[in-house]
Amino acid sequence: MIGFGLSEEQRELQRLAREFAEKEIRPRAQHHDETGEFPREICQKAWELGLMNTHIPEEYGGLGLGVLDGALITEEMAAGCSGIATAMEANTLAEAPVIVGASDDQKKAWLAPMCDEFRLAAYCVTEPDAGSDVAGMKSTARKVGGEYILSGSKMWITNGGVADWYFVVAYTDREKGHRGMTAFVVPSDAAGIELGKKEQNMGQRASDTRAVTFHDVKVPEANRIGGEGQGWSLAMAAFDHTRPVVASGAVGVARSALEHALRYSTERETFGKPIARHQAIQFMIAEMARDVEAARLLVWKAAWKIDQGERNTLEAAYAKLFAADMVMRVTTDAVQVFGGYGFSREYPVEKLMRDAKVYQIYEGTSQVQRMIIARELYRQIEGA
């Protein structure tokens, strides 16, 4: 039987996240957007409530919650401020390949401490010339005795300047292409790491995004995740877990924009009546609500499927693509509903529109999601 009802525990988790977003995130959103200050205090409060690192297995001190649970939390957090939500959710992306591919000892070393005390991590894969084209990566890790010498520059790393450790992928054998990439966990205080300046981004400005450069950093062999040549597969496997959650953040931003537009349309009057009574506005609101609901259902399906232990690459791409393009449409329409006021930084929808754009870019652009969808569909035909 198909059902869309949440369990009592999931409803409680959703309620807790919504209350946290209303009390702790939304009142501080404008400050962090204007200053770009990293929301460490807010993140720590979320960690203390158990709203971070929820997917870490119980045997390593985590809650062992599923991807759908994480999506419920992230939608609420992003509805408060997606920049702050992204600062929290960066842990999930960094930890996912460790959960998927690390040994028991490695999980005890890197995941358990995330539950014992407030710590941050970063997924350190993207490079100046290798974003969607991961094969264009130039970073290398050269084996010398019992350690690797890591060299290269990473770019646009979320939590880059505040992370306690990085999940890093580099070539150990360039001639093998993506099968020559290897993954490592690298402590952020290792000698030879250089941090770039914090990027002044269009939106999600609370997120600490910057370059991270490795100058002959010595990485013990014990910090290698999986075998040599498994880095690319681990990095990509993480996306099946994280893309539904990222898409849920887009749903949260769009939901917030819809709520603001609904409320404003009942207050603003033109031609002697609230604009909510004009059919043109009603149609915009109806389409916004339709798209938010459709995106949420795609997120839930993608998250539910991987929680059942099934491959969800296609569904995760559906969710990420639709939600990313949807949030851009919905926030743009919200600005339109507000009219001239929507173009002013004194009103909330302007920030939401700026925050929305990056959903079409990070964790795989909307164009890459289309490529994945087409590849998966043709793969099904070939396998039939």
Image (tube, rainbow, N blue to C red):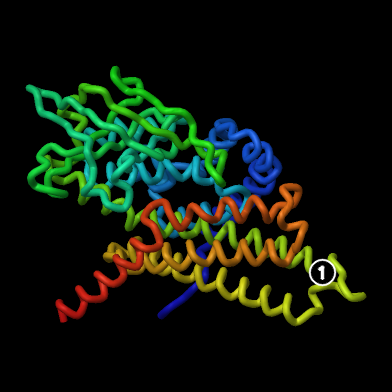
In the image: residue 264, left or right of residue 324:
right
User: Along the horizontal axis of the image, is 13 left or right of 189?
Assistant: right
On the image, which quarter does residue 383 sit in? bottom left
**Of residues 357 and 258, the one drawn nearer to the viewer in this rendering:** 357
**Based on the displayed image, in which of its 4 quarters is residue 349 positioned?**
bottom right
Residue 69, visible in the rendered structure: no
Residue 264 in the image: x percent, y percent? 78, 63
- Residue at left offset 62%, top offset 72%: 289
Query: Where is 109 relative to 383, above or below?
Result: above
Placement of the N terminus among the 4 image quadrants: bottom left
Taking 102 as reference, is 73 above or below it? Answer: below
Image coordinates for residue 75, horizontal then vertical, percent: 54, 56
Q: Residue at x 28, y 72 (%)?
A: 374
Viewer-nearest residue: 296 or 20: 296
Q: Position of residue 18 (x, y in %)?
A: 62, 52
Residues packed near mark 1 inside 10 Å, few (<14), some (14 to 19) or many (20 plus): few
The answer to whether residue 341 is seen in the rendering is: yes
From the image, tell me which residue sits under label 1: 266
Going 72% across and 48% down the picture, which residue do you hit? Answer: 345
Q: Residue at x 28, y 66 (%)?
A: 310
Looking at the picture, does residue 223 appear above or below residue 282?
A: above
Query: Could you say where residue 185 lies in the image, as x and y percent from the top left?
Result: 27, 33
How many labels were placed on the picture? 1
Tell me: 125 left or right of 195.
left
The local secondary structure at tag 1 comes to: helix
On-image quarter of the C terminus: bottom left
Residue furthest to the right in view is: 272
Amino acid type assigned to the residue bearing label 1 in the image: Thr
* 136 or 99, nearer to the observer: 136
Q: Is residue 142 left or right of residue 134?
A: left
